[in-house]
Image (tube, grey):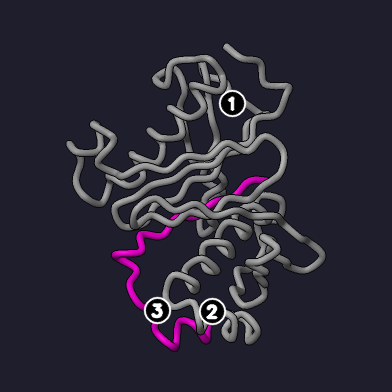
Amino acid sequence: MVGNDIVDLDEAGEPSPRFVARVLAPAERERALGGGAKAVWRLWAAKEAVYKALARRDPELPFAHARFIVDAEAGVVRHGGHTVEVCWQERGAALTCVTRGGDVLSAMAAIDDDPGARELPAAARPSRAARWLARRLLGERLGSEPDELEVVRPSRGRGSRAGAPEVWRRGRRLDGVELSLAHDGAFVACAALVRPTVRPW
């Protein structure tokens, strides 16, 4: 299972007490108090990443934030009967969290790193840049040109959440690739799990 999240620490700023009370379990609140805003956003990113991973298997999974319990020292998130390993990375104001296990690839970038995103309206740039980053990451792994890959987000029907992003090549979906995309503020991130059944180009 793969999931990721990214937080623009400059834009996120100081989390409000109401936000902290809503998304953190009591034990998490106590631990996060001494770490300041960044500690809270680390927990938030881990919860988001693991939710995305578990929702891939259970699309009806409710995102009750405080039920995803983060043990930052052990690098795990627990929910129900699941224990998912996670890791964090920081680059400047970007903080990302990715689930671990298997051959998980991950990358982060600034939205403005994508030349094509600069030409779009502001609201369309993050999604475009996240897909651009994913095509670059997977192109390297699969030995193909990024433009030969397409990242699509299927709809589950009216009133339903969109499904997890899919990767297509030559008009066919690559069933052995799981992809997670994230964006916040000025940054985008992606994480992918490529199973051995997916042949390089």
Q: Amino acid at mark 3?
A: Pro
Q: Residue at x 66, y 15 (%)?
A: 199
Report, in whole angstroms, how far the alpha carbon at label 3 lies from the one at label 1: 40 Å
Q: Amino acid at mark 1?
A: Arg
Image: magenta residue range? 1-23
Q: Nearer the viewer, residue 169 or 143?
A: 143
- Quarter of the rendering containing residue 200: top right
Location of mark 3 (residue): 15
Answer above or below: position of 37 versus 87.
below
* Between discs 2 and 1, the one toward the N terminus: 2
Answer above or below: position of 68 versus 152.
below
Location of mark 1 (residue): 173
x, y (%) of residue 154? 52, 41
Disc 3 vs disc 1: which is toward the camera?
3
Residue sitting farthest toward the top:
201
Q: Amino acid at mark 2?
A: Ala
Location of mark 2 (residue): 32
Disc 2 vs disc 1: which is toward the camera?
2
- Quarter of the rendering containing residue 196: top right
* Between discs 3 and 1, the one toward the N terminus: 3
Task: Count numbered badges in the picture.
Answer: 3
